[in-house]
Image (cartoon, rainbow, N blue to C red):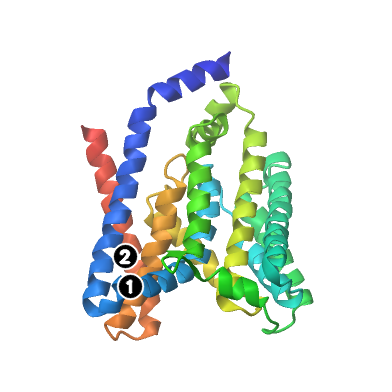
């Protein structure tokens, strides 16, 4: 009964919540389009299907990592295990290559299974044992990195040719396959966002104690969140393997901080309860496009991190100003 009342109140305020989410997504999409205009001005080939497909292939691993991270952050948590899951998936596919369409499907399922397993461990540690998410996931990340080093001690190995070629290719020479994988995650998010689970996710992120008093099983929601995030990290590892075509036991490390940056850039509050997966994916797209823009203008690669940090600060400040203006109205 209490949860039903909570759901009713949440649904009553749903249009306003969706407006806030849409506003944040519109902002980051606008930033992306402006950046792409600069990129296209400097590099006319940026408007070709080939160039866009290449950009999408580079973006997909970080976009998927940010999508999983966004789920956890919305629930007012942090997940450092993303780096470990991606690393294990990468070295596994490089050492135990399975070629052909069937091998690619089995490889994808194996990566998802790895992510789900790590996510379930995180869920038990955080939701059941009530450990702090940042401490629990730091531990699982270290364990995962150790397992990755056991599987492959140094960069090497080779990902199956079918995965490396087809998963980074284009359907009908126009649609990037990597883009379809990311689009699939977005569609799943749109389906669950307004479900009982989706409403509960935002509720515990906003105020876990109030959510529990409203009848929400906060432990179950947190557990499911870490499992879902782990599954998406597995997909990220699969797509990173397709992009690199080789293995590296530390391949997931660079995506750790960038996943948080993408989430924040997309307007998802690191204090929980606000944001969304699509905006976080667009945040990842902006970060990767920014690298291309800087390179096209001849700016040295070691300045990339500095520019990404400045862009992140500006976006967060501007998003905060929009939120305050909306609340003032």
The secondary element bearing badge 1 is classed as: loop
Image position of 108 (left or right of 321): right
Residue 16 image point, x, y percent: 33, 30
- Can see residue 225? yes
Q: Position of residue 178 (x, y in %)?
A: 51, 64
* Nearer to the camera, 220 or 94: 94
Residue sitting farthest toward the front = 172
- Pick out the residue farthest to the top: 1
Q: Which mark is residue 22?
A: none
Which of discs 1 and 2 lies nearer the camera? The answer is 1
Nearer to the camera, 151 or 179: 179
- Relative horizontal placement of residue 105, taking residue 264 as reference (left or right): right
Question: Does residue 205 appear in this view?
Answer: no
Query: Which label's residue is closer to the chain start, 1 or 2?
Result: 1
71 or 189: nearer the eye?
A: 189
Residue 112 position (above or below residue 104)? above
- Is 58 placed left or right of 196 in the picture? left
Q: Quadrant of residue 263?
A: bottom left
- Specify the quadrant that holds the C terminus: top left
* Circle 2 Cα neighbour tier, 10 Å, few/some/many (<14 / 14–19 / ≥20): some
- Residue corresponding to mark 1: 48
Q: CA distance from mark 1 to mark 2?
A: 26 Å
* Helix, strand or loop status at disc 2: helix
C-beta proximity under 8 Å, tags 1 and 2: no
Residue, disc 2: 311
Residue at 40%, 83% in the rendered image: 302
Task: Name the residue at 25% across, 47% down.
Answer: 321
Q: Residue at x 26, y 82 (%)?
A: 297
């Amino acid at each position: 009964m209490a949860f039903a009342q909570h759901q009713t109140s949440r649904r009553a305020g749903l249009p306003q919540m969706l407006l806030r989410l849409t506003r944040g997504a519109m902002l980051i999409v606008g930033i992306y389009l402006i950046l792409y205009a600069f990129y296209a001005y400097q590099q006319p080939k940026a408007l070709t299907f080939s160039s866009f497909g290449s950009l999408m292939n580079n973006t997909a691993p970080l976009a998927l990592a940010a999508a999983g991270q966004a789920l956890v952050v919305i629930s007012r948590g942090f997940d450092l295990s993303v780096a470990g899951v991606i690393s294990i998936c990468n070295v596994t596919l490089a050492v135990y290559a399975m070629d052909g369409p069937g091998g690619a499907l089995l490889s994808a399922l194996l990566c998802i299974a790895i992510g789900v397993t790590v996510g379930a461990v995180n869920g038990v540690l955080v939701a059941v044992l009530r450990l702090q998410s940042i401490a629990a996931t730091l531990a699982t990340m270290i364990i995962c990195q150790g397992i990755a080093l056991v599987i492959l001690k140094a960069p090497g190995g080779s990902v199956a040719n079918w995965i490396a070629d087809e998963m980074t290719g284009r359907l009908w020479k126009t649609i990037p396959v990597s883009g379809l994988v990311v689009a699939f995650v977005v569609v799943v998010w749109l389906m669950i966002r307004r479900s009982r689970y989706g409403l509960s996710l935002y509720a515990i992120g906003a105020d876990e104690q109030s959510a529990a008093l409203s009848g929400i099983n906060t432990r179950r929601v947190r557990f499911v969140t870490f499992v879902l995030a782990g599954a998406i990290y597995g997909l990220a590892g699969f797509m990173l393997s397709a992009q690199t075509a080789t293995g590296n036991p530390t391949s997931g490390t660079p995506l750790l901080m960038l996943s948080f940056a993408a989430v924040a850039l997309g307007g998802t509050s690191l204090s929980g309860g606000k944001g969304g997966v699509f905006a976080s994916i667009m945040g990842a797209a902006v970060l990767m496009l920014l690298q291309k823009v800087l390179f096209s203008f001849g700016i040295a690669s070691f300045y990339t991190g500095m520019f990404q940090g400045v862009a992140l600060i500006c976006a967060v400040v501007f998003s905060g100003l929009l939120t305050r203006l909306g609340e003032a109205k």
